[in-house]
Amino acid sequence: MRRKRLRAVLFGPQGAGKSLQASLIAERFGVPLVSSGEAFREEIAERSALGDLASEYVDAGMFAPDELANATLGRKLKALDQEQGFVLDGYPRNVEQAETLDRVSRVTLAIQIKIPDSVAVKRLAGRLVCTDCRTVLHRDGMGSSSGIRPCPICGGKLAPRPKDEEETVRRRLAAYHFMTEPLAGYYRQRGVLLAVNGEQTVTDLFEELNRKLAKLGFVA
Ligand SMILES: [Zn+2]
């Protein structure tokens, strides 16, 4: 089979482990990882016109509107070597953004990581956040709530995420189903959808993705 360029997007509900798989794939295939969150933070740090606009949404904890997301990520993608490929995390978030993206650079693989809402809620409820470096970790293996170990990154204090988290998570999941999940139909029609089960360990999921990507003709 002819070697295909990996121009991949990943989508899945919060808690599916999407960002982690995105960075693992980017590393394995030697392609740049483009994260929407990072792209916005860069624009904000540069105090560009896009960044000033983006900061209003980021400060309010809201998703950027389509025009802003398309402009920010479009700018980022156009700066890349198109022959090298990329892995996108956090963009596109809806079908309109996916259509815009296809006009900038045609996606060759869309990975959908699926987990039930109940699993997403359970995973996110068990998260700890470092009060110093803001790293988010799962409670498993970090000791009991009475004796939580320090942050493995910076040695700071780990604390459970706030109590209202579950309500927030459920709202985000509802938004995901309504807004982002229709990407599956869009990319299925394009013939580039790869749906995988996110209810497995990070390592197992990454191995499954590696096998399936190889079968599809993507060579690391
Ligand atoms: Zn830390």
Image (spheres, rainbow, N blue to C red):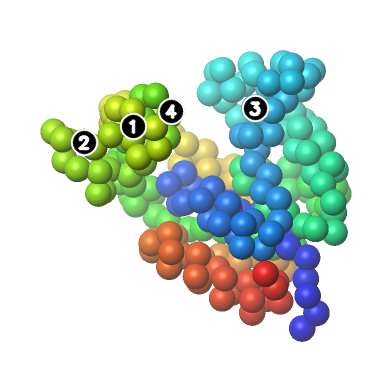
Task: State whether label 4 is within 8 Å of ligand 1.
Answer: yes
Mark 1: C-beta under 8 Å from nearest atom of ligand 1: yes
Residue where numbered disc 1 is placed = 155
Image spot of residue 138 (x, y percent): 33, 44
Earlier residue among tags 1 and 2:
2
Under circle 3, the secondary element is helix
Residue that protrudes farthest toward the bottom in the picture: 1
Q: Mark 4 highlights which residue?
A: 133
Q: Amino acid at mark 1?
A: Gly
153 or 22, which lies in front?
153
Quadrant housing residue 66: top right
Question: Left or right: 206 with respect to 154?
Answer: right
Upstream in the sequence, badge 4 or badge 2? 4
| Residue 43, position as x, y percentages in the image | 72, 25
- Per the rendering, the mark at residue 148 is 2
Quadrant placement of the C terminus:
bottom right
Residue 208 location in percent, x, y?
50, 71
Residue at 40% across, 37% down: 153
Evaluate whether residue 161 shows in this view: no
Q: CA distance from mark 1 to mark 4?
A: 9 Å
Considering only order in the chain, which callout, 4 or 1, is on the residue closer to the N terminus? 4
Identify the residue at horizontal 61%, vertical 62% (top origin).
28
